Amino acid sequence: MNSFIISSFLTAILSIILGLFVFLQDAKNKINKIWLLTASAVFVSWISLGYICLSNSPEQALIWQKILYVGAIFVPIFLFNFCSIFVNSEGRSKILLFIGYIFASFFIVILFCTNLFISGVDNITSIHYWPVQIGILYYLFLAYHIFYVICTIVVLYLARKNANGVTRKQIDYIFYGALVSIIGGSTSFLLDFNISSYPMVGNYLMMFYVVFVTYAILKHHLFNLKVIATELLTFIIWMFLLVRVLLSTSTRDQIIDGSLLGIIVIFGIFLIRSVVKEITQREKIEKLATDLETANVRLTELDRQKSEFVSFATHQLRAPLTAMKGYASMILEGDMGTMADEVKLGVSRIFDSAKTLTNIVDDYLNLSRIELGTMKYVFDVLDFKTLIEDIVAELKPNIEKSGLKFTFTAENGDVDYRITADRDKFKQVIENLIDNSMKYTPKGSVALSLSFNRPLHKFVFMIKDTGIGIDPDVLPHLFAKWSRAGNANKTNIKGTGLGLFVAKEIISAHHGTIRAESPGEGKGSTFIVEMDPWGKM
Ligand code: ADP
């Protein structure tokens, strides 16, 4: 036995094992069936090739030679059929397939019934026997062979151009594999013309092809090379043990090797199954991850669109609200003449509602700006203490109406309260905090204080109230988007849960900090803002 014979047998065995293996994955699948037929034809050709070399007489070699041609006749048409199904062009290839099968049947008849195909074998050095006495119809067979190989390549090439993703990869495997096998397969034909002075690489190239196509098919079914490798290894061990059982001379050896084979078969099946399961799961997870990624991209886009819409809508709402607030305020201040008390009450309700709505609209507008990253700051130097005093003055009517004890103390002395801040935005934060403390304090007091912490070199602004307080569980999430404590909801005080989120964003942009403290529900709360003095930011 030389390496040529061994590689012939190996090609044949590998081909039939992989053909069967693919077929057993899903016996009903058309692709798997036709691949089994193709692999069987390869098996017939290559097993015969091995036996031709081992033949003892020209007669025996001729029989094997004819069997070889049974495979060789069917390989191209099966292959063409397989590729047509694989790339979904079976319908278009129908006529060619029909003609091909007619030709194949015709060749089989003339091969066995006449001498027009091959009439005898000869002894050639490298392979021992080979059919050098070829008949006239052999040339027709060659033409048929070349024609269907070209058809296969064309079908694959066209499909390859239009495919993408996994399908493209599969077709690539088959396409390049086919090219390799054609080069390999064609080397065998040269022998027919008594040309044998070249390396006999056909067998090895054919092996590649079988593996390539099998991989391509299995890839389709979410398997991969790891599974094929495991299965091949297992099959090889089984075969090795089977040969040992068959070759064992003593009963004792037969029992030992047989039992070993039994155990290895069972373990092998379990091993293959577990690898298949693991890979299927992994592929599923990979698919889920891809789906998730796509969904995430889509969600991000939707989120952006939502923010844009909110930004647009709130912007449109702001102008009429400002007008409502302005006119209501003018009427209340008597700029438009005197009015009855009932009218005044009505207008003050309109004013309050317009103000609440403006705050809500501002919250949404700020949120969308933060999410879109379009929040713009215009920094200026301003006096922190004066700013609070101005706000307190503006809120005076509300403070008086609330009936709360309201105080503001600032550490005086030689403190310079200048900070660097965006006036409007910073003011909005402080207003919001004072507004909250009044909102969430039904009775009692609200105390504001401003001081300079010398060791930390920071201004500390505190708003301490005796209101509904904050549950310690809620405190860590208080500055998150949409965060509202349970007790805030219960008090029937309307809010968006956005004010503190926006406040934190704005204060962070000022390189300051904001935090809340509370001993618990019903025990009041303190909000603390710390800012760097001017010149440090
Ligand atoms: P809103 O007041 O619109 O609900 P905020 O973001 O301003 O939204 O406040 C978030 C939550 O923090 C409030 O719903 C409330 O539960 C809590 N909170 C804020 N300020 C106080 C306060 N002074 N006392 C008690 N709870 C407060």
Image (spheres, helix red, strand yellow):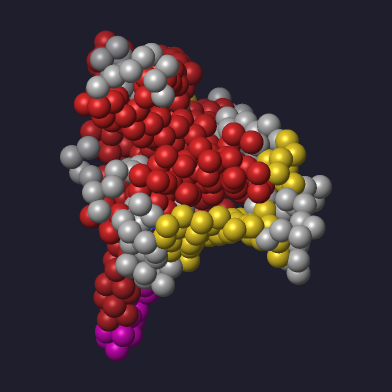
Residue 144 sits above or below residue 294 on the image: above
Q: Does residue 186 appear in the picture of this structure? A: yes
State the residue at coordinates (27%, 72%).
266
- Residue drawn 76% across and 60% down? 413
Question: Picture coordinates of residue 323 (x, y %)?
Answer: 41, 17
- Residue 169 or residue 5, whichever sits in front: 169
Find residue 120 and report its horizontal and vertical position in percent: 42, 31
Q: Nearer the viewer, residue 36 or 310?
A: 310
Say if 77 sits above or below 47 in the image: above
Considering only vertical position in the picture, is 366 above or below 332? below
What x and y, as percent, mark residue 48?
A: 39, 43
Is residue 242 covered in magenta? yes
Q: Magenta stretch mostly in which secondary structure?
A: helix
Is 478 one of the magenta-colored residues? no
Point 59% across, 58% down: residue: 409
Q: Quadrant of residue 359?
A: top left
Q: Residue at x 33, y 18 (%)?
A: 338
* Residue placed furthest toward the left: 28
- The magenta stretch is 241-257
Q: Nearer the viewer, residue 533 or 337?
A: 337
Q: Nearer the viewer, residue 464 or 117?
A: 464
Percent coordinates x, y for residue 425 in the rendering: 58, 37
